[in-house]
Image (tube, helix red, strand yellow):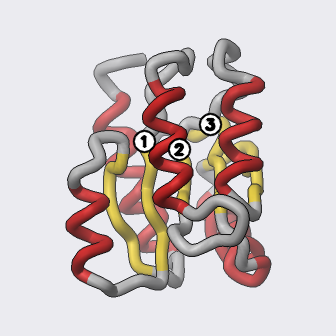
Amino acid sequence: MKKIENICLIDDDMIFQFLTQKVICETKLVKDIDLFSNGLDAIKFLKSVQNERELLPDIILLDLFMPVMDGWAFLDEYRKLESKLAKEIPIFIVSSSIDPSDLQKSKLISSVSDFIVKPMTKEKFLHIIKNFSLSSSGTS
């Protein structure tokens, strides 16, 4: 499985951040994790490193329900920024939502690779890494 340099985790729930970091670290497949508690901070970060391929995350894990800028607003801003980024970044929505309309809405957004229902387990994370490895194997 491909080793990931950097993951961007955008979620306002500190307990979820902590547990997800633990799951990710257990796999030993990820070097760094950038944590953001709202979409606005994450967008500002992406804009600040948009031309620096090695600083951009390989994967974004995105919650939908957050203060300041929620996941949907983040995705709107991300779409405007996407073409300026030095590399393609798959986004995995990780949400406690089980609302079928959220899942449907996410499927209409090309940059969203998958919709994962919380909590993040090792199995779910390995599924993400496997998807990432398959999708990026031809582009590196």
Q: Earlier in the sequence, mark 2 or mark 1?
A: 2
* 41 or 95: nearer the viewer: 41
Instruction: For marks 2 and 1, give the CA distance.
Output: 5 Å
> What is the three-letter code of the residue carrying label 1?
Pro
Q: Quick one: SS at disc 3?
A: loop
- What amino acid is labelled 2 in the image? Ile
- Dot 3, how many residues are within 10 Å of its Cα: few (below 14), some (14-19), or many (20+)? many
Q: Residue at x 58, y 40 (%)?
A: 4
Q: Classify the position of the N terminus by image quarter.
A: top left
Horizontal relation, residue 10 to residue 139: left or right: right
**Foreground residue among 28 and 7:** 7
Residue 135's place in the image compared with 18, above or below, is above
Q: Is residue 51 above or below residue 27?
A: above
Residue at image position (65%, 29%) is 56
Q: Quadrant of residue 126?
A: bottom left
Q: Earlier in the sequence, mark 1 or mark 3?
A: 3
Q: Are marks 3 and 2 in contact (CB under 8 Å)?
A: yes
* Mark drawn on residue 59: 2
Q: Residue at x 55, y 36 (%)?
A: 58
Q: Which residue is mark 1?
A: 90
Query: Which numbered dot is residue 28?
Result: none
Find the distance from the CA under tag 1 to the CA under tag 3.
9 Å
Residue 113 vs 55, above or below: the answer is below
**Mark 2–mark 1 CB contact (< 8 Å):** yes
Q: Could you classify mark 2 by the number of other residues whose Cα lies within 10 Å: few (under 14), some (14-19), or many (20 or more)?
A: many
Using residue 62 as the reference point, say whether residue 99 is left or right of it. Answer: left
Quarter of the rendering occupied by the C terminus: top left
Assess whether mark 3 and mark 1 are in contact (beta carbons under 8 angstroms): no
- Name the spot of residue 113 as percent of width and height, x first: 33, 50
x, y (%) of residue 90? Answer: 42, 41
Q: Which residue is mark 3?
A: 57
